[in-house]
Image (tube, coloured by chain):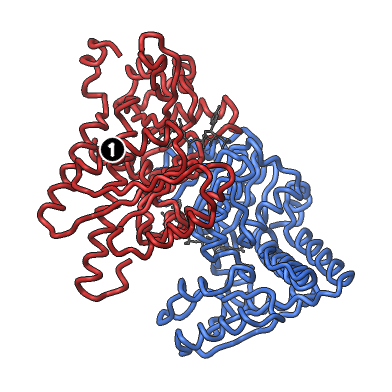
Chain colours: A red, B blue
């Protein structure tokens, strides 16, 4: 984005980096005024470059928040059994408050069995069956909300976007973004529609036209294109949350590529009230919410040990 | 409904009684050609007249399907502990294939704890956490789909209504109807919107206008009124599933009341392709699907014992 555009649309931009930084310092302050030392265990198998990048970002943000991150880097060929044994030992270790397994895992491992093994009270990614079940019950309260969806709701709240009664369109229905963000928006009393690859064009256009909040989590660069946007002709001054992270070729970059979202940002922004940039929108919030969940887990564990109560988590 | 109207709209009427009867005879045939004797345990606490009515209907339909129903009628003042002990013994009893707890329970009992205690392989109501979790995962496959939502999908299928790609509006978001029927419609690739009491009028009107399938599960007689319908002006020839069962005063009835749905049937029917009546639409299908789930549970249990495999359920 050019400097002029940036200036022009400054107050339309939802600055995820800024909000994430403020959440990190809030966590840090909270930790400093407590005698709690939260610890997050990060389990990584193999060294896919993208996974290693995400783990590095999580460790860096954890350090900035005053949270200790312990990185368990296992060989590509680790067995299902050893991995489960590690999870069990982390489950049973009172010094560990949160456990995440960096996905995807190598094909020979059963991802579901492994993520489901993480005890609910330490499932800070919020993907375990108990947390997902609570998320989808009318009056359910998950112990931890999944991080990307929680980050999106937090951004909307911090930007004073009214969720209750809003017409919310979620494009994408995955278990880690589309599905749970739809559930959270509905819990906050939005009227929610979920669109996906089987939604026909005319239907999609019509839903985009009438939405107040649009979450795009498809994973296709330029999915919400200038053309589609013009066709939809949304006059409701909507808020757009762009979750996509797509790498497209860019010769001007040393790496040869750059990261863009699912939305044609420059062409869509004139007709919206607010929009998240990529990078710097949802991404940093995902990590901040992971740390917030870890802090919550540590607080719960501490109060449990303090009072002797076993019911809190 | 007058006889003339009935004649006029015969092919618009989705005859749930007929479909349910055909499902019951299918179950009966299947049982007769097997050596399996399915048993359903029905746990009822107290004798609320509505609960007793529903239990009677389930027992009658079970008999018609060749399924043995064992009715456990407990006193209003039964303790949480005794009820859990009963559930445990039913869980452990190889002769019992399906277990349902007739809701609502008296206030002093913890409904969640009791329904969650039913072992997943016998949770033929489909309300337990494992089944709900699977229902809401992108590629999840519940062991049992909840009965009213399953009955609705079965009706749509048997009436050759195209679900894939349809624009489906679900009004109501309860855990027993609205939420799970939305999940099932989405699994079948409809684009689904859930409206509820916080959806404003204009938004609701707009969604009704553009829907191909409308499931009304609100519990308010005449909710989808002639007025609302005219305002929405849906020209897509939609299918309407009326889940509501509301009792309104009727002096011409011995009981002093009669049962109506949420939809102003007579005034809405001219502009729809199909609609379920109340009574005689979704209601009988709910019971038929409960028996179908019980038959499935019994078949699974039998094949497990036959082969010695423990993995099937
Ligand atoms: N910033 C962050 O922190 C995070 C970013 N992401 C990014 O978000 C994006 C989505 O991730 P994720 O949800 O895991 O991806 P998935 O691939 O699991 O899901 C993509 C969804 O988009 C739908 N879709 C695909 N094509 C179309 C289309 N033409 N029209 C409408 N819908 C379509 C799919 O539909 P169907 O179900 O029918 O196949 C599917 O539901 C990715 O770019 C990912 O990198 C993800 C997690 C965190
Ligand atoms: N035929 C059958 O087999 C069955 C029939 N039923 C019948 O279906 C109906 C619904 O049952 P159930 O889901 O358990 O009921 P609930 O009362 O649990 O849920 C009703 C839903 O309707 C919503 N609602 C209430 N008022 C409005 C309004 N003005 N506009 C839009 N939405 C509204 C509520 O919204 P909110 O969430 O915001 O409160 C809620 O989500 C009842 O009549 C029940 O008897 C139920 C089960 C089986």
The residue sitting at 38% across, 17% down in the picture is: A255
| Left or right, residue A134 beside residue B281 | left
Q: Quadrant of the C terminus of chain B?
A: bottom right
Q: Chain of mark 1?
A: A
Q: Quadrant of the N terminus of chain B?
A: bottom right
The residue sitting at 59% across, 84% down in the picture is: B89
Mark yes or no: residue A155 visible.
yes
Compared to residue A270, the image places residue A32 above or below, namely: below
Respond yes or no on whether mark 1 lies under 8 Å from ligand 1.
no
Q: Position of residue B118 (x, y in %)?
A: 56, 74
Q: Nearest the camera: B249 or A133?
A: A133
Compared to residue A239, the image places residue B9 above or below, namely: below
Q: Nearest the camera: A165 or A255?
A: A255
Task: Say which quarter of the image contains residue A287.
Answer: top left
Q: Position of residue A91 (x, y in %)?
A: 38, 62
The residue sitting at 37% across, 41% down in the picture is: A148
Q: Is disc 1 placed on a helix, strand or loop? A: helix
| Left or right, residue A287 beside residue A129 | left
Compared to residue B25, the image places residue A209 above or below, namely: above
The residue sitting at 45% across, 36% down in the picture is: A170
Mark yes or no: residue B204 visible.
no
| Left or right, residue A232 beside residue A2 | right
Identify residue for label 1.
A155
Q: State the residue lying farthest toward the right.
A: B33
Q: State the residue lying farthest toward the left.
A: A33
Q: Residues within 10 Å of mark 1 (few under 14, many from 20)?
A: many
């Amino acid at each position: 984005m050019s400097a002029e555009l940036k200036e022009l649309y400054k107050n339309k931009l939802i600055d995820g980096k800024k909000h994430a930084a403020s959440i990190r310092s809030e966590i840090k302050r909270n930790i400093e005024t407590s005698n709690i030392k939260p610890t997050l265990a990060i389990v990584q198998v193999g060294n896919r470059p993208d996974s290693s990048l995400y783990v590095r970002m999580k460790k860096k943000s954890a350090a900035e928040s005053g949270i200790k991150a312990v990185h368990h880097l296992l060989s590509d060929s680790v067995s299902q059994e050893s991995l489960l044994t590690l999870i069990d030992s982390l489950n049973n270790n009172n010094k560990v408050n949160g456990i995440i397994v960096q996905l995807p895992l190598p094909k020979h491992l059963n991802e579901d069995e492994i993520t489901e093994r993480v005890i609910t009270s330490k499932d800070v990614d919020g993907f375990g069956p108990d947390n997902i079940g609570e998320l989808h019950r009318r009056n359910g309260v998950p112990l931890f909300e999944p991080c990307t969806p929680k980050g999106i709701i937090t951004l909307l709240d911090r930007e004073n976007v009214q969720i209750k009664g809003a017409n919310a369109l979620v494009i994408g229905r995955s278990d880690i973004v589309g599905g749970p963000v739809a559930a959270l928006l509905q819990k906050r009393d939005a009227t929610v529609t979920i669109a996906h690859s089987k939604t026909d064009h005319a239907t999609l256009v019509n839903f985009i036209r009438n939405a107040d909040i649009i979450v795009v989590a498809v994973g296709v660069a330029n999915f919400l294109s200038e053309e589609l946007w013009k066709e939809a002709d949304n006059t409701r001054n909507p808020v757009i949350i762009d979750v996509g992270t797509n790498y497209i070729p860019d010769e001007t970059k040393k790496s040869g590529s750059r990261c863009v979202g699912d939305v044609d940002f420059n062409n869509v922004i004139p007709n919206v009230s607010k929009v998240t940039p990529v990078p710097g929108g949802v991404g940093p919030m995902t990590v901040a919410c992971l740390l917030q969940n870890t802090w919550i887990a540590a607080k719960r564990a501490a109060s449990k040990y303090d009072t002797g109560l076993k019911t809190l988590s």
